Amino acid sequence: MTLTPNQRAEFRRGVREIVEPSFGISAWALVTGVAMIKSGLSVPLATLMSIAVYAGSAQLAALPLIAAGAPLWVILATAFCMNLRFVIFSAHWRKYFGHFPRAQRLALMYLAADLTYVLFLRRFPRPEPAPGQVPYFLGSVLWSWLCWQVPSLLGIALADRIPTDWDLGFAGVLALLGLAYSTLSGRNSWIAGLVAAAAAVAAFRLPLKLNIVVAIAAGVAVGMLLDRLRPNAGEERR
Amino acid sequence: MSDWQTFAAILGLTVITVVTRGFFLLSADEWPIPRWLTRGLRYAPLAALAAIVAPEILLSDGALVGDWKDARLLAAAASTAYFFWRRGILGTIVVGAAVMLAAKLGLGW
C-alpha cells in the first residue's frame, strides 16, 4: 500500500500526539502486569490476557473474580460494565468509521482505547468522515498498543521485583488528568467536566463502576444544556 | 479455577473488548443517532476522563480523603499547577509522580 504525503503526515501526527500521555499509561500497564501475576495467573495466561484482552480496567476487575472462581457469566458481565464507556464512545466512532466493511470497523475498534478516542476527537472535532482519519487513528493506536503491551509484559516478567507501595499506577491517572485539562475549551466544557467529576464521586458506591456511566451522562447532559442556554461560551478557542 | 477455565474466561473477555468498543458498529443498519445527541457527545471524552480521574484523586477506600496530607491529592495539585503553567502532558505526569514519590518516600505520607 502506498501512502500519500498527507497520509504519512497524519500517521506521524497520530503517533506524536499520543507519545506524551502514553508515558503515564505505560506506568499503569506495568502495574496491571504485576497485578495479573499477583492474583495467581500463570505467566503464559497473563501474557495471553495482556495481548488478547487489551483493556486495563476490565482486566483489573476480572482478576479477583477469576481468582475466586466466579462463574464465567459474572466475569463477562462485570467486564462489560467496566467497558460501558466504550459503548458510548462507539456511538461517536460510528460517525467516522461507520461506512467501512464490518471486519475492518471491528478491527479498528478493537484497538480503540481511551487515549486515542480523546485525541482523535480533538484532532477531528466534526463528526463526519474526512481524509487522514484512518492514518491518524492507526498511528495513535499502534503507538499506544506498544506503550501498553511492552510495560505490561515487563510487569509480568518482573512481578516480584517491582515495588507495589510506590503507587506507580497513579501516573496513569495523572496522564488522564493532563489530557482532561487539554480538552477544555470554553466555560461550558469546564462546567461539564466539573459536573462529571462530581457525579463520579457522588455515585461511587454504585456497583460495577456504573458511576462512570452516570458521570458521562451527567457531563454530556449539562454540556448540551449550557450550549443551548449560552451558545458562545462553549466555542472552541483554539 | 483450572487453567482451561481461565483460558475460556480470557477468550470471553477478548470478545467483550470487541463487542463493547465496537458496540454501535456491529450492525451495518442505520442507527439514527439524533443530531442533538451527536453534538452533545463532544462532551463525552472530557466527561469520561473526569469520571475516571476524580474518584482516584478525591476518594480513599470509597470515602472522601479527610486529611490534606495525602500523597495523591498533593500530586494532583502539583500536576494541575504544572499543566496550567506549561501545558505539557509529559511534564504534568513527571511533576505529579515526583511529588507523590517525594511525599510517600520522603515524608512517609
Image (cartoon, coloured by chain):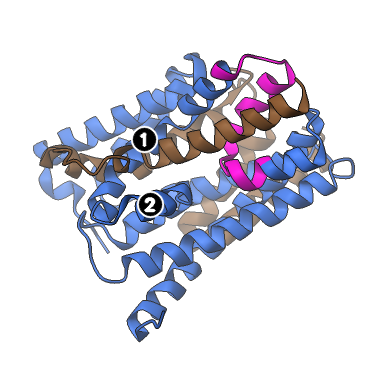
Assess whether residue A215 is covered by the magenta stretch: no
What residue is at 65 percent from the left and 56 percent from the top?
A: B94
Left or right placement of residue A114 versus residue B12 in this view: left
Per the rendered image, the range of residues in magenta is A49-73
Magenta stretch: dominant secondary structure: helix
Marks 1 and 2, how far apart at CA: 18 Å
Residue A96: tell me if it is visible.
Answer: yes
Q: Which residue is mark 2?
A: A103
Residue A210, picture quadrant: top left
| Quadrant of the snapshot with the C terminus of chain A | bottom left
Looking at the picture, do discs 1 and 2 lie on one chain? yes
Disc 1 element: helix
- Counting other residues with Cα less than 10 Å from the Cα at mark 2, is it few (<14), some (14-19), or many (20 or more)? few
Point 40% across, 62% down: residue: A137
Letter of the chain shown blue in the rendering: A
**Circle 1 residue:** A87
Comparing A126 with A197, the one in front is A126
Q: Colour of chain B?
A: brown
